[in-house]
Amino acid sequence: MQRLTYAAIGAKLDMREQTVLMWRGRFLADRLAGLQDKPRPGIKKKITQQQVAEVVRRTLEEKPPDATHWSLRSMAAASGISRSSVNTIWRAFNLQPHRSQTFKLSTDPRFVEKVRDIVGLYTLDASYLGHPLCSLFPAGASAYSTRFSGRIRLASAQPG
């Protein structure tokens, strides 16, 4: 059986010798129950786990009645907790309700027509061969885009 000094134990556990002595004293006095953390000083948490879960659920599943997304103020008012508490919860769960994660369709009345033209040109669908822009492509060419910048690159289907 190897006997280590308190300093050696502290070095192995990356703690001071006084900390090793404190935990040893707690163990000798109360056995395993002494190894439990004692209550910390200061104000106890006022927000329950149910309130945290409710803020997260509302943020993800509901929208405020008069807005497109929750703000700190609106969520604080709806949940009955402070803005800083809402902010802490949102940061802990990496929630950013002001950033939309849904696809939004254009309100342009010609949107569907424009999408059909673009998709038809990219795929060079046979129904678009009479389209005025198809004359820009050489025979047997296919179009594809490598960026979202709107640039179109041509790849010839014929050698050379």
Image (cartoon, helix red, strand yellow):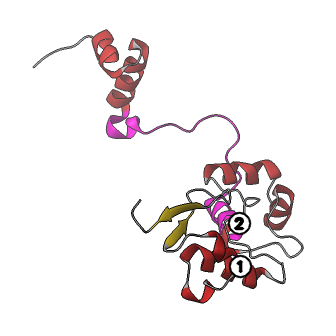
Q: x%, y% of residue 114?
A: 74, 79
Pick out the residue farthest to the left.
1
Q: Is 160 positioned to the left or the right of 90 in the image?
A: left
Q: Is the residue 102 above or below the residue 29 in the image?
A: below
The disc label shown at residue 59, or none: 2
Pick out the residue farthest to the right.
66
State the residue at coordinates (62%, 50%): 92
Q: x%, y% of residue 158?
A: 42, 68
Comes first in the chain, label 2 or label 1: 2
State the residue at coordinates (79%, 66%): 69
Q: Is the residue 35 above or below the residue 156 in the image?
A: above
SS at badge 2: helix
Question: What's the residue type where badge 2 is placed?
Answer: Thr
Q: How many marks?
A: 2
Residue 6 lies in quadrant: top left
Q: x%, y% of residue 51?
A: 68, 63
Q: Residues within 10 Å of mark 2 (few under 14, many from 20)?
A: some
Q: Is 49 positioned to the left or the right of 140 in the image?
A: right
Whether 40 is among the magenta residues is: yes
Question: What's the residue type where badge 1 is placed?
Answer: Pro
Q: 25 or 106: nearer the eye?
A: 106
Q: Is the residue 20 above or below the residue 68 in the image?
A: above
Q: 134 or 113: nearer the eye?
A: 134
> Where does the C terminus fall, quadrant-wise?
bottom left
Q: Would you name the residue on which mark 1 appears?
A: 132
State the residue at coordinates (74%, 50%): 87
> Where does the N terminus fall, quadrant-wise?
top left
Q: Nearer the viewer, mark 2 or mark 1?
A: 1
SS at badge 1: helix
Q: Which segment did they paint magenta?
A: 30-59
